[in-house]
Image (cartoon, grey):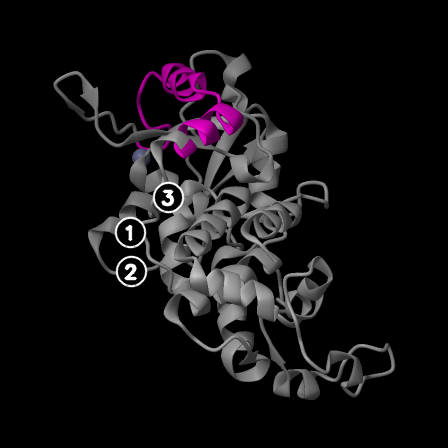
Amino acid sequence: MDRVEFLKRICGINVWKNAGRRAPHKPLLLLLALGRVYRGDDRLCRYGEDIEDRLRALLVRFGPPRRAHKPEEPYKRLSRDGLWEIPGFDHLPTVKSGAPLLKALRESRGGFPESLYRTLQADPILVIEASQEILDGHFPKSLHEDILDAVGLPAYLRRSPVQDAEVLRERRDPGFRHRVLRAYERRCAICGFDVRIEDQLLGLEAAHIKWHAAGGPDKVTNGLALCMFHHKALDVGALGLECVNHDIKIIVSSEVNGLSKGVSLLLDFRNARLRPPQTEALAPDCRYVDWHRREVFREPAWETA
Ligand SMILES: [Zn+2]
């Protein structure tokens, strides 16, 4: 498989099929496997030893909040996209439903098909490009470094300014940031942060409530002006929102913990009202708020003291 075909197939798995439900299983497995190629590991690795626990941990950390994750699903299914191979898969002992016995699956070995593995090995830039494509397709920018770090890929991915410009043209509305910051009067909608150096805002960002990577639009009603800290907290699901009558309430995950003063940057705002934008018409749309609660927020929310 050549680089063009590979990138085409990567884009193929970047299609969102389930009406806004996040499906990061295959993307995270691919990133894990790309990390192995990058480090020069063997093509095939044992599911039970090398993948199962690591992929589950990635799903818990970067996947949607679900009661249980099944890392064996992408391991089995990625073959259908022509991006994976499990030698002897058809001969594994099965359970009644026809699915392979988990114990046998754990003993099996999987990895990129031989020709693709050779292409990737010879072309580290392709490994980087493919990783970036997957990240852009499934996760907000604020999580990219954490994910790369977790799968053992270099945290700073290089791409040319021309590519960046293309990505921006194609996917981003350059006016989004400006319109969102204006709507919230250039202050964090959670904490009011508005520090400037001379006339330059410091660390104030336009966040998407429904992730851009998940098809969330570049509309002010899907945006929030947030300081860097609260932006990251929103994207990892430490912080969430709830539509209550005509207000938006701030909720904090009960998974948040720590002893430093910094924790109060979250806990002080639990159940507080989100600072509203200039006009009601610009307020967050509850469809996007509900998406974030369902697909990102780490339940359960901290109850009112
Ligand atoms: Zn803030």
Mark 2: few, some, or many residues within 10 Å (few <14, many ≥20)?
Answer: few
Identify the residue at image location x=42%, y=12%: 278
Q: Amino acid at mark 3?
A: Lys
Query: Residue 181: where, in percent of width, then height?
Result: 37, 20
Q: CA distance from mark 2 to mark 3?
A: 17 Å
Query: Residue 139: where, in percent of width, then height?
Result: 50, 46
User: Is residue 273 visible in this depiction of the protein?
Assistant: no
Q: Nearer the viewer, residue 20 or 88?
A: 88
Q: Mark 2 falls on what kind of element? A: loop
Q: Is residue 179 magenta?
A: yes
Q: Are marks 2 and 3 in contact (CB under 8 Å)?
A: no
Residue 109 in the image: above or below residue 268: below
Identify the residue at image location x=66%, y=47%: 12
Q: Nearer the viewer, residue 252 or 7?
A: 7
For marks 1 and 2 on the same chain, the one whose residue lies earlier in the sequence: 2
Residue 179 in the image: above or below residue 47: above
Q: Which mark is residue 282?
A: none
Circle 3 residue: 232
Circle 2 residue: 258
Q: Amino acid at mark 1?
A: Val
Identify the residue at image location x=38%, y=60%: 153
Q: Which mark is residue 263?
A: 1
